[in-house]
Image: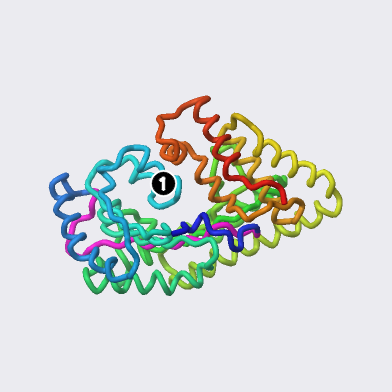
């Protein structure tokens, strides 16, 4: 089955990924972080007994594993593909993961909270994802009673999740807008309205690939629909501004942009060694070119999927080798050469 980041529909617009995540805890039970190793094993067994039969009823052959039994590369690869969060990479305590074949639906048992339900999609909007996640939440809630307070809502391990327990996010591709002098100020303005905008790759000083995640900062005091609407509106506004900047740039610097896109393609298709930063930068430029019809490929390819696959742990698993340094950069270049189509 094709995984969500390998789908080739609706790839070249500003919108890249939509994600909804809910965290829940079981009423009358201590949160995982306060449990001993033995108690966490018992809690995991309890959750498996209660919840896993539900996944079997879904009609999809969900894969299930104990995260603490996976090696570091497998856990990091799941993190790179956005299936689990970073705390699951480092934590060796008993926790489980149920994952759909397309990796769009995941359920983490006994992580930071007792339950973490997540949906990912490159084509469905947050508004369309919410009824699906809400139904899954209700079905799980029929099997275990959630920890809930009439005043504060759902009780969670972190105060920032108390309330709805919902985190809604949209990944947008902003290669032009993010290079503007006012972009940092724009991010600060959105934070005043409870919206966080952070680069998806790179560090605090530099973002590789022009990808930014737009998400709600709090989950308390608003309904799920209001939070989803807030994030969707912010992402839509950023997308509109990106399109406006691109339109102006294409009118005044069309040949320059076209030249940069073709140069990026040439490097990606023929380079023998690429750092992660270089790979992300050139794939971002190529994605811009495909979005604006500056370049054509002989067949569709999901460039965000390539961006996920060239991250270190996924590369190592793909090659079944313990790669580091130059060997990792060589493997990255080879992977892109093999999976990037020829010009159309």
Q: In screen coordinates, is 226 left or right of 233? A: left
Image quarter of the N terminus = bottom left
Please tell me whether residue 32 belongs to the stretch shown in magenta: yes
Mark 1 crowd level (few <14, some 14–19, many ≥20, 10 Å Cα): some
Coloring basis for residues: rainbow
Q: Position of residue 122 (x, y in %)?
A: 53, 61
Q: In screen coordinates, is 93 left or right of 333? A: left
Q: Position of residue 344 (x, y in %)?
A: 72, 52
**Vertical arrangement, residue 46 with respect to residue 324, above or below:** below
Q: Which residues are magenta?
A: 13-33
Q: Name the residue furthest top.
A: 326
* Snapshot quadrant of residue 202: top right
* Residue at x 30% of width, y 51% of height: 112
Mark 1 = which residue? Answer: 79
Q: Position of residue 151 (x, y in %)?
A: 32, 70
* Residue at x 39% of width, y 59% of height: 101
Q: Nearer the viewer, residue 101 or 139?
A: 101
Q: Nearer the viewer, residue 228 or 78?
A: 78
Please tell me whether residue 61 belongs to the stretch shown in magenta: no
* Residue at x 44% of width, y 63% of height: 20
* Snapshot quadrant of residue 13: bottom right
**Vertical arrangement, residue 291 with respect to residue 318, above or below:** below
């Amino acid at each position: 089955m094709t995984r969500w980041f390998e789908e080739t529909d609706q790839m070249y617009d500003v919108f890249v990924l939509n994600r909804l995540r809910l965290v829940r805890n079981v009423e009358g039970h201590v949160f995982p972080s306060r449990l001993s190793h033995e108690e966490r094993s018992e809690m995991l067994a309890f959750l498996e007994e209660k919840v896993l039969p539900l996944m079997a009823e879904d009609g999809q052959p969900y894969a299930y594993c104990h995260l603490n039994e996976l090696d570091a590369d497998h856990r990091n690869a799941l993190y790179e593909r956005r299936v689990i969060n970073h705390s699951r990479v480092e934590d060796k305590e008993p926790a489980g993961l149920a994952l759909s074949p397309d990796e769009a639906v995941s359920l983490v048992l006994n992580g930071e909270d007792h339950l973490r339900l997540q949906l990912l999609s490159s084509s469905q909007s947050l508004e369309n994802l919410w009824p699906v996640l809400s139904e899954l939440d209700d079905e799980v809630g029929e099997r275990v009673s959630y920890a809930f307070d009439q005043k504060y809502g759902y009780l969670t391990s972190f105060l920032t999740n108390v309330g709805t327990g919902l985190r809604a996010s949209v990944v947008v591709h902003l290669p032009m807008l993010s290079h503007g002098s006012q972009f940092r100020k724009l991010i600060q303005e959105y934070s005043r309205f409870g919206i966080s905008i952070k680069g998806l790759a790179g560090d605090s000083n530099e973002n590789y690939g022009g990808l930014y995640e737009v998400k709600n900062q709090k989950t308390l005091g608003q309904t799920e629909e209001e939070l989803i609407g807030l994030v969707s509106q912010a992402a839509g506004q950023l997308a509109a501004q990106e399109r406006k900047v691109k339109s102006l740039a294409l009118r005044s610097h069309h040949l320059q942009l076209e030249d940069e896109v073709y140069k990026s393609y040439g490097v990606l298709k023929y380079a023998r060694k690429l750092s992660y930063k270089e790979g992300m930068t050139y794939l971002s430029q190529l994605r811009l070119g495909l979005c604006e019809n500056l370049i054509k490929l002989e067949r569709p390819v999901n460039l965000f999927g390539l961006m996920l696959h060239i991250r270190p742990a996924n590369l190592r698993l793909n090659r079944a080798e313990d790669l580091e340094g130059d060997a990792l950069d060589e493997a990255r270049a080879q992977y892109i050469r093999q999976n990037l189509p020829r010009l159309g």
